[in-house]
Amino acid sequence: MMLSTALIAIDSTVLATAVPSIVDDVGGFSAFPWLFSVYLLAQAVTVPLCGKLADLFGRKPIMLAGIGLFLLGSILCGLAWSMGALIAFRVVQGLGAGAIAPMTTTIAGDIYTTEERAKAQGYIAGMWGVASVVGPALGGVFSEYTSWRWIFLVNVPLCLIAAGMVLRNFTERVERSRPAVDYTGAALLTGGLTLLILALLEGGQRWAWASPAGVGAVVVGVALLVGFLVVERRAEEPVLPLWVFRRRLLVSSGAASAAIGAVVFGLTSYIPTYVQDVLGAGPLVAGFALATLSFGWPIAASQSGRIYLRVGFRVCAVIGTSIALAGTLLLLLLNEHTSVWQVAGTCLFIGVGMGLTNSPTLIAAQSSVGWHERGVVTANNLFMRSVGSAVGIAVFGAIANAVLGDGPRTPEKVTDAVQHIVVVIVGLSVVLLLAAIALPRTPRASEVTG
């Protein structure tokens, strides 16, 4: 599960330093931002669909299908002859990632006890933090010393190893039947989510928010989702059951996941820029300053089981969100004279808080349902994080553009932009704390049988 997660996580960041090499080879500079957008978009809209399919047909076939799609997409990307082809093949990669992401966490929820899940899912979650540091460095190494195409082709043996490990080591018992697949609901959900997330990702970038494209994407997307809600009320096996949005625990954990997605995106996107442009450090040092976030996260997550087994999921999440909020408040102290060590220590503090928050909220949601609903619940939680990241991209990008303007990017302007972004991150951390407080009081995790 960790290897599969590492594959899809690294491929979301690995292109950051390889863009110049790619453009020199295949051209299409004006279109390169789509390499990132379409991957995130395809992954986000696939997650809820694959969660439901896993509940209907089992985790193993969906996991293997995801690895297969990711493998195919990687091969095609490595052979791409133009920017347009590369963008199209990144969609294939994203579809595979959208199947892998919820399956790794769902399978961990299936095969580990409530006590063991904290450590297992902490390690899996840690892969995303590692990717934010390793991905750009790996992309730079391949681009400089071999070819950018190896960024994708190196996935081939890793995908084969991951698939082989799943085939050999994971067994499950699934009641074979002929479930009614909600094709109409799936189509409406995919179309609606695609348009809304696309509007968030590209609004203010590819087109103006008030442009026909921006407004049209939102209007049509909302209309499709309204149609989806109508269909789901009557569907025999709804692709996204509406009870997910009526249970306090699932709504609270979903809100927490969305806030986490936005906060993490803000940190991973702008802290390295601040360290380099304002503090004058190099990319390696900037990566170190952010890496402490990914160090603190899995360590705290792996130990969170000891806490929620004693005091319950809610109290553990409140402790974690309080630490994360304190850490984001420390970010308000950042200025042109801040040391890199202070930045690294603050990120470490936030990472510990996130680790004590993310695992308990997700595991609480998983433990509240049985096997046949766990895929949907897990996928919904991960999808909310994708939504939070997409909203974060739009909000933080708008703030940065407004502060920096069209002039030169001076240290003073970058500091000002980062400080504005930090204020929003603090606000999101408050929302995260409120979401944890809103979790229903539950018995100690040791008394939960899910």
Image (spheres, rainbow, N blue to C red):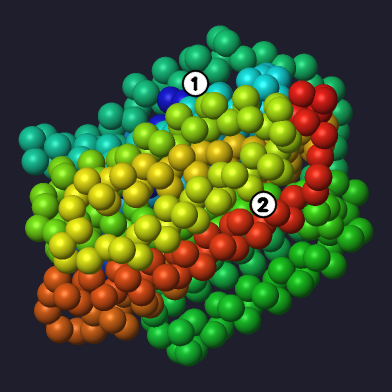
Is residue 154 depicted above or below 399 in this figure?
above
Where in the figure is residue 301, as x and y percent of width and height?
53, 33
In the image, 270 versus 296, the foreground residue is: 296
Mark 2 lies on residue: 436
Residue type beneath disc 2: Ala
* Few, some or many residues within 10 Å of mark 2 (<14, 14–19, 20+): many
Q: Quadrant of the C terminus?
A: top right
Mark 1 lies on residue: 163
Where in the figure is residue 297, as x and y percent of width and height?
45, 37
**Horizontal side of residue 110 vs 146, given as left or right:** right
Measured Cα–Cα span from mark 2 to mark 1: 36 Å
Q: Nearer the viewer, mark 2 or mark 1?
A: 2
Would you say residue 80 is visible in this rendering?
no
Q: Earlier in the sequence, mark 2 or mark 1?
A: 1
**Horizontal side of residue 281 vs 316, given as left or right:** left
In the image, 395 versus 412, the foreground residue is: 412
User: Which residue is pictured at 35% across the width and 47% down the height?
Assistant: 347
Is residue 11 depicted above or below 408 in this figure?
above
Residue type beneath disc 1: Ala
* Label 2: which secondary element: helix
Is residue 233 depicted above or below 144 in this figure?
below
